[in-house]
Amino acid sequence: MNGVILRWPVPIGTSINAQYYQKVLQDKLRPAIRKKRPGLLESGILFHHDNVPVHTVRAVTDVLAGYKRELLEHPCYSPDLARCDFHLFPKMKEHLRGQGFETEEDIIQATKVAIKNLDKCSYVTSFKDWLQRIEKCANNDGCYVE
């Protein structure tokens, strides 16, 4: 709700599997949380990600179990509830639209700037929108909502 904690570009040709995701959680996300949100790991995290297999395998859930966190369930087949898809990515696209990039590094830098340019209010608004979508989904017996 307070902004992006970790922006991690996946190297070209890298497969996102359980081992890779587990390593990012341990080696990248955990230190980023400690740096950007001191005390959050100790006070507790509300953690939400979708239910693709790479997020739900034992190796990943074991890493997450080490975080003092509440893991929110994500209904099957509900891409409408992924906050990045309805908030972050469209906002980044607005900033990046019409630009051309020569190198991968140019893309990485442009997305970094796009994320930095998002105001704090937009994160709060997206969180409230997300809660409304979850409520609508629950009231709809878990069916897809837009």
Image (spheres, rainbow, N blue to C red):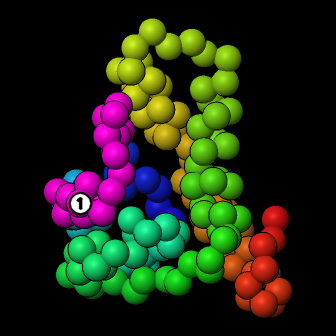
The quadrant where residue 47 appears = bottom left
* Nearer to me, 61 or 131: 61
Q: Is residue 18 left or right of residue 127?
A: left
From this viewpoint, is residue 1 visible? yes
Looking at the rendered structure, the kind of residue marked 1 is Gln
Q: Is residue 62 left or right of residue 2?
A: left
Residue shown at the point (74%, 74%) measured from the top left = 133
The quadrant where residue 37 appears = bottom left
Q: Is residue 79 magenta?
A: no
Residue occupied by mark 1:
19
Residue shown at the point (78%, 90%) measured from the top left = 141
**Position of residue 62 measured from the top left corner of the image (x, y, whole percent):** 23, 80
Element class at badge 1: helix
Q: Magenta region: which residues? A: 8-27
The quadrant where residue 31 appears = bottom left
Residue shown at the point (64%, 42%) measured from the top left = 91
**Position of residue 16 measured from the top left corner of the image (x, y, whole percent):** 36, 51
